[in-house]
């Protein structure tokens, strides 16, 4: 009997415990369900506040970064403008006697003034400031950004037609025929479009043997980035134009230093990107562009195709303010 009571008592206690647990579980579940929504809302508010703080910090940092970038860009542009003004001048006036060369080239058919005007200004007539080089006895040459293409074309005609050993015995005739180069096949500004009718034909600029050697020396040391060759191999318009300029200056007794400085001025207008990049490259390496000799800047290291490309890459591919495109190798 006693064991039975104990067994019943134990069973009863188990029942009470199960009932209690079940009842309390339901109560607790209800409580959690009611308060769970509150906990969830509080949790979401905390997360939202945290994320909002991060977003605010990111936006603030981005605005500050943009502000810094704009300031730095403005400062960089200001520095580039200063450097650009150092390299490219408003104009040059060279004491080079042009005399009646323009008039003689027109008379010989080397230059057709209407074709030249159409190529340079898009009309049939040259403006007065350019036409004067075909009328009188001009004692100087003015060079600026506006007439740089005019001088490429006119000097091209001069270099092409003036009789010189460089054209007759140099690399232009290495294959026995010079008609296939850009400087010859591309010349369309004469009355006859076959440039070989004018090639090394006229003695516009007579030179002594000594002067000829100086021309060859200087021509061999001046490069251009469009084709990569020196002026001693004038296979494009810029090379032929430079040859004409060198011949003209040597014939008038100009010093080598003056000739290199003048040649650099012309090349700078014809290939502005090349020399602006060179100036920036030199500045980055602690050197002043204006203190580098014109001869060095015109050398293969700076002015040949490969040299100028290497310098440009090391300068960082800068977009220069208000920079026009360089000249092409055609009329």
Image: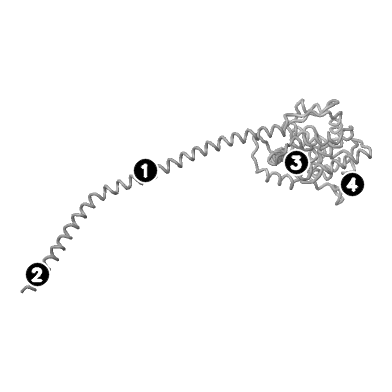
Task: Report the residue marked by disc 4.
Answer: 169
Q: Which residue is mark 3?
A: 330
Q: In front of the other: label 1 or label 4?
A: 1
Q: CA distance from mark 1 to mark 4?
A: 84 Å
Q: Closer to the observer: label 4 or label 2? A: 2
**Colour scheme shown:** one colour
The answer to whether the residue labelled 4 contacts the one labelled 2, judged by CB atoms less than 8 Å apart, is no
Residue 253: horizontal and vertical position, in percent?
Answer: 89, 33
Query: Viewer-nearest of labels 3 and 1?
Result: 1
Residue at horizontal 86 percent and vertical 36 percent from the top? 256
Q: Left or right: where does residue 12 sit relative to residue 147? A: left
For label 3, the crowd category at 10 Å Cα-Cα, with few meaning under 14, some 14 to 19 and many 20 or more, is some
N-terminal label among 4 and 2:
2
Label 1 vs 2, first from the N-terminus: 2
Q: Quadrant of residue 291?
A: top right
User: In whole angstroms, how far apart are the C-alphas of marks 3 and 4?
Assistant: 24 Å
Residue lying at 89% horizontally and 47% vertically, measured from the top left: 169
**Residue 330: image location, x then y, percent:** 75, 41
Identify the secondary structure beneath mark 1: helix
Q: Earlier in the sequence, mark 1 or mark 4?
A: 1
Query: Could you say where residue 59 lies in the image, as x and y percent from the top left?
Result: 46, 40
Label 2, on which residue?
8
- Residue at label 1? 49
Of discs 1 and 2, which sits in the foreground?
2
The residues bearing labels 4 and 2 have C-alpha atoms spaced at a distance of: 132 Å
| Left or right relative to 63: residue 271 | right
**Residue 186 quadrant:** top right
Image quadrant holding the C terminus, namely top right
Give the camera-side residue of 164 and 230. 230
Cα separation, mark 1 vs mark 2, equals 59 Å
Crowding near the residue tagged with mark 4, few <14, some 14–19, many ≥20 C-alpha atoms within 10 Å: few
Answer above or below: position of 7 versus 222.
below
């Amino acid at each position: 009997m006693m064991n039975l009571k104990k067994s019943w008592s134990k069973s009863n206690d188990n029942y009470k415990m199960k009932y209690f647990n079940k009842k309390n579980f339901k109560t607790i579940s209800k409580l959690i369900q009611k308060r769970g929504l509150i906990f969830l809302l509080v949790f979401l508010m905390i997360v939202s506040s945290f994320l909002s703080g991060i977003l605010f910090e990111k936006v603030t940092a981005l605005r500050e970064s943009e502000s810094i970038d704009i300031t730095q860009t403005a400062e960089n542009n200001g520095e580039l403008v200063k450097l650009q003004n150092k390299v490219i001048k408003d104009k040059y006036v060279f004491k080079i006697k042009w005399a009646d060369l323009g008039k003689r080239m027109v008379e010989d058919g080397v230059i057709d003034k209407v074709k030249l005007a159409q190529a340079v200004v898009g009309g049939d007539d040259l403006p007065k400031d350019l036409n004067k080089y075909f009328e009188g006895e001009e004692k100087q040459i003015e060079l600026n950004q506006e007439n740089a293409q005019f001088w490429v074309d006119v000097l091209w005609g001069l270099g092409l037609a003036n009789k010189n050993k460089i054209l007759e015995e140099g690399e232009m005739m290495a294959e026995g025929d010079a008609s296939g180069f850009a400087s010859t096949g591309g010349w369309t500004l004469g009355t006859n479009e076959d440039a070989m009718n004018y090639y090394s034909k006229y003695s516009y600029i007579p030179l002594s043997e000594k002067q000829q050697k100086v021309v060859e020396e200087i021509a061999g040391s001046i490069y251009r980035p469009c084709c990569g060759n020196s002026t001693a191999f004038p296979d494009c318009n810029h090379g032929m134009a430079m040859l004409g300029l060198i011949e003209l200056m040597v014939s008038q007794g100009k010093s080598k230093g003056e000739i290199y400085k003048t040649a650099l001025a012309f090349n700078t207008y014809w290939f502005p990107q090349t020399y602006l990049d060179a100036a920036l490259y030199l500045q980055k390496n602690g050197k002043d562009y204006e203190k580098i000799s014109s001869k060095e800047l015109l050398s293969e290291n700076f002015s040949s195709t490969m040299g100028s490309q290497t310098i440009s890459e090391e300068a960082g591919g800068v977009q220069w303010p208000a920079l026009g495109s360089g000249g092409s190798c055609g009329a």
